[in-house]
Each structure stands twice: as structure tokens, then as C-alpha cells.
Image (cartoon, grey):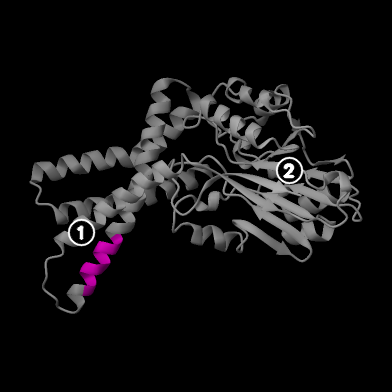
């Protein structure tokens, strides 16, 4: 399975870089030697992200972190260079179809310039963390919960790109919000080799009155998740592993991502919890899926992440299709409230275009 996946990724990356190469050499008057040099450079860049991903899985040092971050940044630029290269090629073909004999070199240069500008914007924009406030009303909400604030963070992807300083910045922002309870919705770790204890130490500075609760994401499964879970427990964070706890009359359910992606398994988990449908129930679930099953189980409010809102427009078209429109934002499914966050960190390119890095505050 992994060989098939890597083969598909390699083919896509090769296609992307081949198109970029063809456009570059068609726009600029390079000599044969220069074309060969550009081809070699683009081939190296094409292979760089896969090589960097393998290295960071086994090694944690300055070289692997810099190499991974550089290759990930290039991957983001390559995406937009490919996208605008396709626009340039399509425009050329339209002009040829109608026998319009005009040089479009200027348009090709413009396309490449726009791609680079968008990439730079994406790099800068992802560093700004938006505080998103959502007012939420749940049926039968106890008086003790009225006026309380809950913070939801997800998809930090701590690892080669996001380090302990990033964690500290997030913790400082949460402490400024001063929530009553904190939810961490999975993909806290990116899955690369790191000091999993040290990188989350700042979370020990969180002291919400009702506690901090964590559920796993798919990236916690990239390695033996026990090393991550042990580190999280030692920081004083409560892990909800397919279980329910009642906090001042509100039922809080947390499910493991690996166990809750299958409908049958998810139903078994929910039915085993003996959820009281007369009480408000908050479900922490990494992926915004199996919504009908959550409604049937009596969930009042499902909070999810995972999608990143695709990070980079126009890829959000695909996340919207995959998650049937529930890939981002606040929605209602029957009587159940659903919110999907775009997360804080990134995977792959540390870029955001058309999506925000966000901390979500729910005001009950």
C-alpha cells in the first residue's frame, strides 16, 4: 500500500515539475547548458520533499529540520507555479486554436510572478493566528455552563517546522483568552522524529478550571502513539480515548481517530458510552465525518479539525467534496451543531491561502 502511495506521489511531483520546466524554457531564451542546469535543479527539488520526509522520520537534527522546511516551502511555490503554468499553457492553446499570432511571453512572466507573490503571501499569512469567536447554544445547558468559554485547537503538527517556541506562542494566546476548558483536537504532533516531551512542555502552563482534554488525530498514528500519549499525560492533559466524562452536567465524549473513521466501529464506541440524550453532549472528533451516526447517538455538538480547509486555495474544492461541505465552519445537522476548524499549524507547505491559522473560542 505504501509503495503504491509513494508511486502516485512521485508521479504527481514529476508531472508538476515537468510542466514548470516546459514553461520556464518556453518563456526564457536559455542556452542548452542552461536548460540542462534548470532540469537538474528541478529534478532535485522534485525529489527533495520525499527525501526530507524520510529523513525527518528517522532523524532529528538541525540539518533535517532545515532541509524539510526548505523543501516544504518549495513544494508550496511549486504548486502555484504549476497552477499558473497551466493557465499560461491553456491561454497559448486558445490563441493557437483561433490562429492569433501574438507573443504571450509577457503573460507567461506575469503568471510566474503572480505565483511567486501568492506563495510569499501564503508564507506570511500562515504565521498570523486568528482568534475566532463562536457563540453556541446547546439544549438543556446547565446554568453553570452559561457564560463559559471553551478553546478548541487542532492540527498544530509539531515537528520539523513547528517547534517549542510555536507551542509557547499558542499557550500564551490561550492564557490571554482565559478559557474555562481547553480541547486539543488531534494532530498535535506531525509524526516526525522529535523530542516529544520537550516540544509540548509549555502546555503545562495551561490551567483552565475545567481541565484540558485531548483526542488523537491521524498523525499521532504515524509512529507508535504511546510515546506521544505518555508525553501528553505527563503534561497534565486528560486524554479521552473512546470515553465519556461528565463535567458539571455536560457530557464530554472524545474518540480516537483511528477507531472512529469506520462507521461500524464508531457506532459501537458511541453505543458503549450510554449517552444520556436528555443532557447536552459535546463530541471531540478529529475528522468531520460520520455525522449522521453522531446525531443518532444524541450528540449535541461535534467539534472537528483535520481538513486544514485545504490550506491552499483552490484545493478547498476537494476538501469540500470529500467532507460534503462540512470541511470548515459552523453547520447544523438535524438538531446537532457541527464546527470544523482549519487548525493552527500546517502539513507540507507552511502556507495558507484562502484559509486561516486559528484558535477557536466557543462562548456558551
Kindly report the secondary structure that dominates the magenta region of the rendered protein: helix
Q: Which residue is identified by label 1?
A: 108
Query: Residue at left 38%, top 45%?
Result: 76
Instruction: Report the span colored magenta.
Output: 86-94
Q: Describe the element under mark 2 as helix, strand or loop.
A: strand
The relative height of residue 8 versus residue 62 in the rendered view (above or below) is below
- Give the total number of marks visible in the rendering: 2
Query: Which percent across, then down, holds residue 29?
Result: 9, 51
Residue in the picture at 56% in, 61% down: 320
Q: Is residue 259 above or below residue 321?
A: above
Residue 31, horizontal then vertical, whole percent: 7, 46
Q: CA distance from mark 2 to mark 1?
A: 50 Å
Q: Quadrant of residue 242?
A: top right
From the top left corner, tell me how far across and down residue 270 is, in percent.
Answer: 83, 50
Residue at image x 72%, y 42%? 150
In the picture provided, is 145 more to the left or to the right than 212? right
Residue 292 % position (x, y)? 75, 62
Question: Which residue is the site of mark 2?
Answer: 149
- Helix, strand or loop at disc 1? helix
Question: Is 121 on the left or on the right of 60, as rendered?
Answer: left
Amino acid at each position: 500500500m505504501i509503495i503504491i502511495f509513494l508511486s502516485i506521489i512521485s508521479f504527481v511531483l514529476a508531472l508538476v515539475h515537468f510542466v514548470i520546466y516546459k514553461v520556464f524554457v518556453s518563456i526564457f531564451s536559455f542556452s542548452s547548458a542552461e536548460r540542462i542546469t534548470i532540469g537538474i535543479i528541478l529534478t532535485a527539488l522534485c525529489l527533495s520533499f520525499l527525501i526530507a520526509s524520510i529523513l525527518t522520520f528517522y532523524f532529528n537534527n538541525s540539518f533535517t529540520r532545515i532541509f524539510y522546511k526548505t523543501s516544504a516551502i518549495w513544494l508550496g511555490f511549486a504548486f502555484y507555479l504549476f497552477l499558473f503554468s497551466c493557465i499560461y499553457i491553456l491561454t497559448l492553446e486558445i490563441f493557437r486554436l483561433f490562429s492569433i499570432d501574438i507573443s504571450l511571453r509577457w503573460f507567461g512572466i506575469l503568471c510566474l510572478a503572480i505565483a511567486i507573490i501568492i506563495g510569499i503571501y501564503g508564507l506570511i499569512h500562515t504565521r498570523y493566528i486568528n482568534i475566532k469567536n463562536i457563540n453556541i447554544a446547546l439544549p438543556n445547558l446547565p446554568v453553570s455552563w452559561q457564560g463559559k468559554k471553551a478553546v478548541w485547537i487542532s492540527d498544530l503538527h509539531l515537528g520539523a517546522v513547528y517547534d517549542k517556541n510555536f507551542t509557547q506562542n499558542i499557550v500564551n494566546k490561550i492564557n490571554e483568552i482565559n478559557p474555562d476548558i481547553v480541547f486539543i483536537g488531534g494532530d498535535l504532533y506531525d509524526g516526525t522524529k522529535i523530542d516529544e516531551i520537550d516540544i509540548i512542555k509549555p502546555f503545562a502552563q495551561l490551567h483552565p478550571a475545567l481541565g484540558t482534554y485531548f483526542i488523537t488525530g491521524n498523525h499521532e498514528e504515524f509512529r507508535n502513539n504511546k510515546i506521544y500519549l505518555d508525553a501528553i499525560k505527563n503534561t497534565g492533559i486528560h486524554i479521552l480515548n473512546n470515553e465519556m466524562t461528565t463535567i458539571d452536567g455536560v457530557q464530554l465524549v472524545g474518540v480516537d481517530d483511528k477507531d472512529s473513521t469506520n462507521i461500524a466501529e464508531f457506532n459501537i464506541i458511541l453505543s458503549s458510552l450510554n449517552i444520556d440524550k436528555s443532557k447536552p453532549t459535546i463530541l471531540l472528533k478529529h475528522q468531520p465525518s460520520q455525522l449522521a451516526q453522531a446525531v443518532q447517538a444524541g450528540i449535541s455538538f461535534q467539534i472537528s479539525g483535520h481538513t486544514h480547509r485545504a490550506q491552499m486555495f483552490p484545493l478547498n474544492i476537494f476538501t469540500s467534496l470529500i467532507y460534503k461541505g462540512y470541511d470548515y465552519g459552523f453547520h447544523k445537522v438535524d438538531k446537532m451543531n457541527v464546527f470544523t476548524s482549519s487548525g493552527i499549524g500546517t502539513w507540507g507547505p507552511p502556507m495558507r491561502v484562502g484559509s486561516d491559522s486559528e484558535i477557536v473560542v466557543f462562548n456558551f
